Image (cartoon, helix red, strand yellow):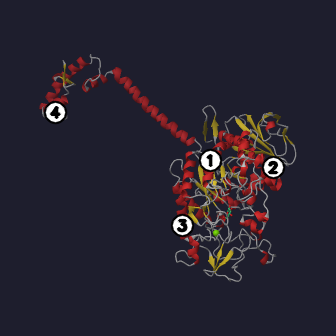
Amino acid sequence: MSLKKNSGQMELEETIRNPGFKDADDGGSAADTSSSGTGERRDSTAVKLDAAAEEYTQLKPYAGMPKEVLLLHSSRARYRVPREILFWLIVCCTLALVAVTITIIALSPPCLRWWHITPVYQVYPRSFKDSDGDGVGDLKGIKEKLDHFLDLNIKAVWISPFYRSPMKDFGYDVEDFRDVDPLFGNMQDFEELLAEMHNKGLKLIMDFIPNHTSDRHRWFNLSRTRDPHYKDYYVWTDCDPASPKPNNWVSIFGNSSWTYDEVRGQCYLHQFLKEQPDLNLRNPDVVQEIIDLISFWLEKGVDGFRMDAVKHMLEAAHLRDEPQVDPDMPPELVTTEWDLYHDYTTSQVGLHDMLREFRAVMDDYSREPGRYRFMVTESYDYEEVDKTMMYYGTPLVKESDFPFNFYLLDLPQNTSGWWAKHLVELWMSNMPSGKWPNWVVGNHDRPRIGSSAGRMYVRAINLMLLTLPGTPTTYYGEEIGMENINITQSQVQDPAGKYNVSLSRDPERSPMQWNSEKNAGFNTQTNKTWLPVHPSYETVNVEVQKEDKGSVLSQYRFLNSLRQSELPFLRGWFCYVLSDTNVFSYLRELDGHKEAYLIVINFGKEFSTTDLSAVKELPYELRVLMSTNANNNQKVFQKSRIQTEAGEGLVIRYSTYTRYHPSHPAQCYVSEKACYLETVGVLYKC
Ligand code: GLC
Ligand code: MG
C-alpha cells in the first residue's frame, strides 16, 4: 500500500479505493446489487477492503487522513464508546436544561414592569424649569433637569399637558392635540426631550384629555357651523338663549354646565370651563379621532398616558335633571358639583368599554420588548371606591394599569394613626385581588398636603408613600418638602380661583425650588415667574438639600433606593400591625427572605410609646434603620417600647424567618404571592 501526492492532495491507490467510487468509475452504481455480475465484484472488493482495513488500522490517525480510513478508525471501540457516551450526555443535558427552563418559567412570578418599580414623578411644565426667561417653564427646561430624576432613582415622569392651548385651564383646554404650545417649545423640543429621556432610561407619560377640547379647537369651530361631518362632535341641545339651561347640570368649576352658542343657536355642554366643550364620545367618529391621537403619540414613542377626567367622558343622552343632594334646596341655588348626585354626567354605561378600546390600542404598541405602554386614569369618586376600582378592568379585560388613588390626599382632615390606616385600608380592601396599588399625596389640583397637614408631617408622608406596597406618585417639589404659596385675589391665575380664591389651585403650582439663587433657579435670566416663588426657597431647595444627609431630599432618595433594592417592598406582603390616635404601623415581609421591615409612623400630635410585645413574630429588640429624625437612626428599642415623636417615621429592619401574614390573613395583602429561595437568590411562585 502506498499513498502518492497529486496536485497537493492525498490520494489512495487502487487497492484502498472506495468500492462505490470504483463502481462509479466502471460506469456502475454502488447501490446497484440487482445484477449478479456486480454482486461478484462487490464480494471481491469487500475481501480486499477487509485486508486493507486491517492494514490501515495499524496507522496512527493524522490530519488530512482520507474519509474512508477515518471511518474505519472511528468504528473501533476506543473511539466509538466515548463518542456514544458523549452523545448521550449531550442528549441528557439538553433534556435536563429544557426541563429546568420550563420549571423556572412555570414557577417564576411575573416580571415587574417599569411602572411597578419606579415612582411616577409629576412635572407641571409651567412650574418646573424656565429655559427662556419668560417666567413660564418649558420642555427645554425639563430636559435640562433630567439628572434630578436619576439622582432620585425615579424613572417615570408624567408631564401635565403641553399641547397647543389658549391656556384657559393651563393646557387642559387643548386647541391642537398634535402640536406643542409655543409657550413650552415646539415639536422638535418634544422629540429631543423624549430622545434624551430614553437615552437616560427614563419613561415619559403624557397627559391625555379625552373628555373635552378647547373652544378654539378646529373641531369645535366646524361643529358650531354645522359642518356635516363635525356637527355631532360635541354635545349640543336646543335651549332658550335668555336662560340657557336645558337642565340642572353644573360644571366642576361652578354654575351651569351649558353655554349658549350664538353661531349655532344651541347650547353646548361643558363639564369644566365654558372654554372646554365636552366631546360627544357617543359619536364613533369622535372615538376614532381619539384613537388616532393616541396612536400619533405612541408612534412618537411616548411610554404612557395619564387619562384626564375619565368619569366625565359620557353623559346620559336623555339629558334629564340630576337629583339634588338636598331635595329642598331651591333649584336656582344648585350651582356646585356638591349639590347634585351625578347620575347622568359621570360613570355612564359604555365608559369602560371605551377605555378598554384605548387600552387595546396601547397594547398593540406594547409588544416590542421593553416598550410597555402604561395607562393611569384620573377619576375622583370620593366615597364610591367601587367606581374607582372598575378602572382596573377585569381579570380577562385589561383597562388602566391603575386608577389614581387619591385617598391619602385626605390625610390632613385628621392627622392620626388610625385615620392614615383607614385611608390606606380604603384602597387595599377594595382593590381587586392581584392588582397593583398606588398612592398619590399631591398633584396640581390639590393643596400640598404637607402644608395642610403641617410641615412636621412632610417627611413621614414621604416615608409612608415609599414604603407602602405599589407605585408612589410624587408631585414636583414633594421630594424637598415644598409647601403651598399664599395667593391674593389679585395674583390668582387659575380660572377655578377667579370665582373664589379659596378654590384656586395656584398655591400648589409655584415654581420649583432648585437653589438659593434668583427665582430659586427656576428662571435664571429675568425676574419673571408666572406665580411667586415660595419664600422658603433659600433653605427648601434641591441644591442645599443634596448636600445635607438629613434633608427631606436625602431621606426621599434613601427610601426610594431601599424600596427598589429590597424585595419585601416590591414583592412582599403588607400587613397592618397597629393603629391608634398617634401611630400607624405596618410591616413588609417576604416568605423565605430573612430581612423584614417594620414601619412605625407617628401621625399624631404628641410623643408616643408603642407596645408591640403582642406581635410574637417580631424580635425582642428592634434597631432603627432610618428615622425621619436622623438623630434616632440606629437607635435600639425594645418591642414593648417603641418611641416616636409627633411627625416621626421609623423604618426598622429585623431578621427572622417567622412570618406574620400566615397567622393574620385578614390584616395582610400581596398583589402576587412570591417566595424567596435565599440559598440561590431566586423568587418563585408559592
Ligand atoms: C383634571 C385636571 C384638572 C383640569 C380638569 C379639566 O381634573 O387634573 O387640572 O382642570 O381635568 O381638564
Ligand atoms: Mg363628557
Foreground: disc 2 or disc 3? 2
User: Residue at left 81%, top 43%?
Assistant: 648
Q: In the structure shown, which secondary structural element does the residue marked by tag 3 occupy? A: helix
User: Residue at left 72%, top 68%?
Assistant: 253
The one of 68 and 514 positioned closer to us in this rendering: 514
Mark 1 CB within 8 Å of ligand 1: no
Question: How many numbered badges does the structure rendering display?
Answer: 4
Marked residue nearer the N-terminal end (1 or 3): 1
Q: Of the residues shown, which amino acid type is indicated by label 2?
A: Arg
Q: Quadrant of residue 547?
A: top right
User: Residue at left 54%, top 41%?
Assistant: 105
Q: Residues within 10 Å of mark 1 (few under 14, many from 20)?
A: some
Q: Of the residues shown, which amino acid type is indicated by label 3?
A: Glu
Marked residue nearer the N-terminal end (2 or 4): 4
Please report contact status of discs 2 and 3: CB closer than 8 Å, yes or no: no
Q: Position of residue 19 (x, y in %)?
A: 18, 28
Q: Which residue is mark 1?
A: 146
Q: CA distance from mark 2 to mark 4?
A: 99 Å
Q: CA distance from mark 2 to mark 3?
A: 45 Å
The one of 481 and 50 positioned closer to us in this rendering: 481
